[in-house]
Image (cartoon, rainbow, N blue to C red):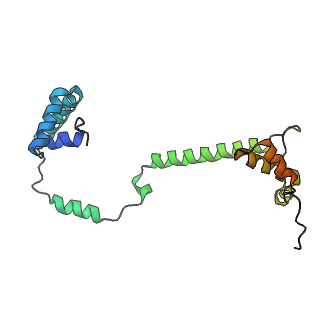
């Protein structure tokens, strides 16, 4: 932990008296030297004192039993906890999003592709083996990316690496 950094949890532990002497001295040094820490400590102290002054009469309640019962209860269905106005807003938002999506899809699908735009390949072109020229280009790019010189690339291409195998098959 950074010795100069004091987190809010440490400030609350300081106010609650849960720090050992070394940690308490560190918080006090930081509060006297750093205006930000001093400001946060004062804010935490005001909140701490306000909560300490708040007296709630729990004499007639078994708080532990109520908390335990609530923790063990099954979670209610989420929509039952929502107000009808909230459900209406959710439904309206969903319907608006669906309508906008459908309208956007229709407008995009109806666009005309100019004739000079590059055409996409059809499925038969994608499934057919690449041409010799495409293989030669790919091999040249691989050799260039590996740092080979032009003469080495020409030698490889002239060696007939791309020629179909004549061995039995």
Left or right, residue 63 beside residue 73:
left
Q: Residue furthest bottom?
A: 168
- Is 103 situated left or right of 61 in this image? right
Which quadrant of the rendered structure holds the N terminus? top left
Using the rendered image of the protein, determine whether residue 120 is visible from the camera's viewpoint: no
Residue closest to the eye, 154 or 18: 154
**Along the line of sight, which residue is nearer the eye, 91 or 114?**
114
* Along the viewing direction, whichever of 144 and 59 lies nearer the viewer: 144
Q: Position of residue 28 (x, y in %)?
A: 13, 34
Image x and y of residue 99, in percent: 65, 45
| Above/below status of 87 relative to 113 | below
Whether residue 67 can be seen here: yes
Residue 39 in the figure: left or right of residue 18: right
**Labels in figure, total:** 0
Q: Residue at x 88, y 70 (%)?
A: 167
- Residue nearer the viewer, 88 or 6: 6
Residue 73 placed where, x, y %?
A: 31, 65
Q: Position of residue 109 (x, y in %)?
A: 77, 45
Q: Is residue 60 left or right of residue 108?
A: left
Residue occupying image coordinates x 18% and y 33%? 41
Residue at 36% in and 62% down:
75
Please identify the quadrant where the C terminus is shown. bottom right
């Amino acid at each position: 932990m950074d010795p100069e950094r004091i987190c809010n949890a440490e400030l609350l532990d300081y106010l609650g008296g849960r720090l050992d002497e070394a940690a308490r001295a560190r918080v006090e040094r930081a509060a006297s030297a750093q205006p930000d820490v001093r400001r946060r400590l004062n804010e935490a102290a005001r909140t701490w004192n306000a909560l300490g002054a708040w007296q709630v009469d729990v004499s007639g309640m078994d708080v532990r039993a109520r908390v335990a019962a609530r923790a063990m209860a099954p979670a209610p269905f989420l929509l039952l906890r929502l107000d009808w106005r909230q459900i209406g807003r959710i439904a309206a938002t969903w319907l608006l999003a669906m309508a906008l999506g459908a309208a956007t899809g229709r407008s995009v699908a109806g666009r005309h592709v100019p004739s000079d735009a590059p055409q996409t390949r059809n499925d038969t072109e994608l499934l057919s083996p690449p041409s010799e020229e495409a293989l030669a280009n790919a091999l040249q790019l691989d050799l260039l990316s590996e740092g080979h010189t032009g003469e080495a690339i020409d030698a490889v291409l002239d060696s007939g690496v791309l020629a179909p195998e004549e061995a039995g098959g």
